[in-house]
Image: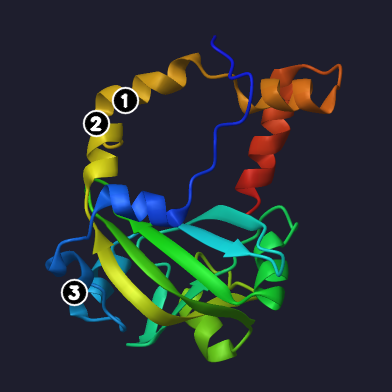
Amino acid sequence: MTHVSRRPRRISVNEVLARLGPPEPMIEAKVQDRVDDYIRFFIAHSPLLMMATADAAGRADCSPRGDYPGFVKVLDEQTVALPDRPGNKIADSFRNLAENDGVGLCFLVPGMREVLRVNGSGYVADEPDVLVRMRTEAKQPQFAIVVEVAEAYFHCGRALIRSRLWDPASQALAEGMPSLGEVAAAQFGVDQDPALLEQALEAGYRELY
């Protein structure tokens, strides 16, 4: 493995923009300031998104959010809401939104190479009328993250094409990966059977629903 002896040189955004050149007018024009019918349709079919937030100091965090397709609800053309399903209780996103309401979402639909990006401001809510719409298998979330949409647009499929994310052959990459039990045993420094650790972790996942 090749190691870099020093950190790469930082270049300015002006230098980056100069090298890239201006975007095509159509690219800039695609950005919407609301949820139209096409965006609503994409959200209704998405079982997975990535949510990015940052705290007051700009320290960023990105976390996956997933459930059955349509788990994110469009409340109106300016507002979407996503449920907070049971997780690790660290609440990084909640803490960040309390300090900095900026939020970015990337929605994916299996088999689709394009990604839907939604940017705006977010906050945590517990409005019963919203939460009941997110009820799944007789369980209702305690909270919802409400996002007031500032930008919404479709991102070209180059990244997913290059990554071959939806190619069944790509699943072979997981075959050589260590199990979560093995990772937990090593990272926590515990002398325990990784298989038993994995069973415990899997049991915790099953309790979420």
- Report the side of 23 relative to 117 (left or right): left
Lateral position of residue 139 relative to residue 174, left or right: right
Quarter occupied by the N terminus: top right
- Give whichever of discs 2 and 3 has the lower sequence position: 3
- Tell me if label 2 and label 3 are in contact, CB under 8 Å: no
In the figure, residue 92 lies in which quadrant?
bottom right
At a point 46% along the width and 80% down the height, the residue shown is 133
Q: Position of residue 177 (x, y in %)?
A: 53, 19
Mark nearer the viewer, 1 or 3: 3
Give me the residue at 74% from left, 23% from top. Answer: 196
Q: Quadrant of residue 47?
A: bottom left
Q: Give the residue pinned by disc 1.
A: 170
Q: Which residue corresponds to the image point at 77% horizontal and 22% vertical from the top-left?
A: 185
Q: Residue 167 carries which label?
A: 2
Q: Mark 3 points at which residue?
A: 29
Classify residue 109 by image quadrant: bottom left
Frontmost residue, 81 versus 27: 27
Given residues 187 and 156, the one toward you in this image is 156
Mark sitting earlier along the chain (1/3): 3
Nearer to us of marks 2 and 3 is 3
Q: Residue at x 67, y 57 (%)?
A: 59
Q: In which quarter of the image is the C terminus?
A: bottom right
Mark 2 is surrounded, within 10 Å at the Cα level, by few (under 14), some (14 to 19) or many (20 or more) other residues, namely few
